[in-house]
Image (cartoon, rainbow, N blue to C red):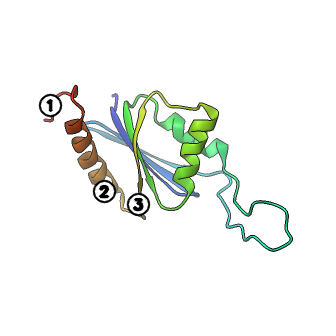
Amino acid sequence: MTHSHAIVWMDSREAHVFRFNAEDVEQDRLKAHMPFRKVHHKAGVIGSGHPTADAEYFHHIVDSLSGTQEWILAGPGQAKDALVSYLDKHSAKPESRLMRVETMDHPTDGELLKHAREAFKAIDRLQPNSPPAR
């Protein structure tokens, strides 16, 4: 069954991917191979003091979105911004459109899915060529 919408909640350690339509939901949990580690910048040390991104982790997230038309990216901290940068720099754009990026702490799976359904209802109302909501 195809799922037209998705929401990805991610942090530096794992991603929760929900692909859904009006009747069905599929969920994946993806673990980062090398989670970002806190890097403390010390005086006299060469380097930016920023953790490196896990490109393989980002690639798995993008792959999990296959078959969706639109998606939302949510999460705390910098990981979601790193994924957006990865998409921009590596032309690893999924066939679906990223509709918005939101800062969101650690919701339960039910809260995340409820938020996504409400957000897509609002998005669909704003798009002039979208079919009427059911």
Question: Which residue is at 28% across, 38% downward?
Answer: 24
User: Which three-letter amino acid code belongs to the residue tagged 3?
Assistant: Met
Q: Is residue 125 above or below residue 82?
A: above
Using the rendered image of the protein, determine whether residue 18 is visible from the camera's viewpoint: no
Disc 2 or disc 1, which is closer to the eye? 1
State the SS at label 2. Answer: helix
Please name the residue that numbered disc 2 is placed on. Answer: 110
Please name the residue that numbered disc 3 is placed on. Answer: 104
Q: Distance between the residues labelled 1 and 3?
A: 28 Å
Question: Which residue is at 73% across, 64% downward?
Answer: 49
In the rendered image, residue 11, in percent from the top left (x then y), is placed at: 53, 57
Name the one closer to the observer, 120 or 4.
120
Tell which circle, 3 or 2, labels the residue nearer the N-terminal end: 3
Please name the residue that numbered disc 1 is placed on. Answer: 132
Question: Mark 3–mark 2 contact, CB under 8 Å?
Answer: no
State the SS at label 1. Answer: loop
Question: Which residue is at 46% across, 30% downward?
Answer: 66
> Is 79 displayed left or right of 104 in the figure?
right
Question: Mark 1–mark 3 contact, CB under 8 Å?
Answer: no
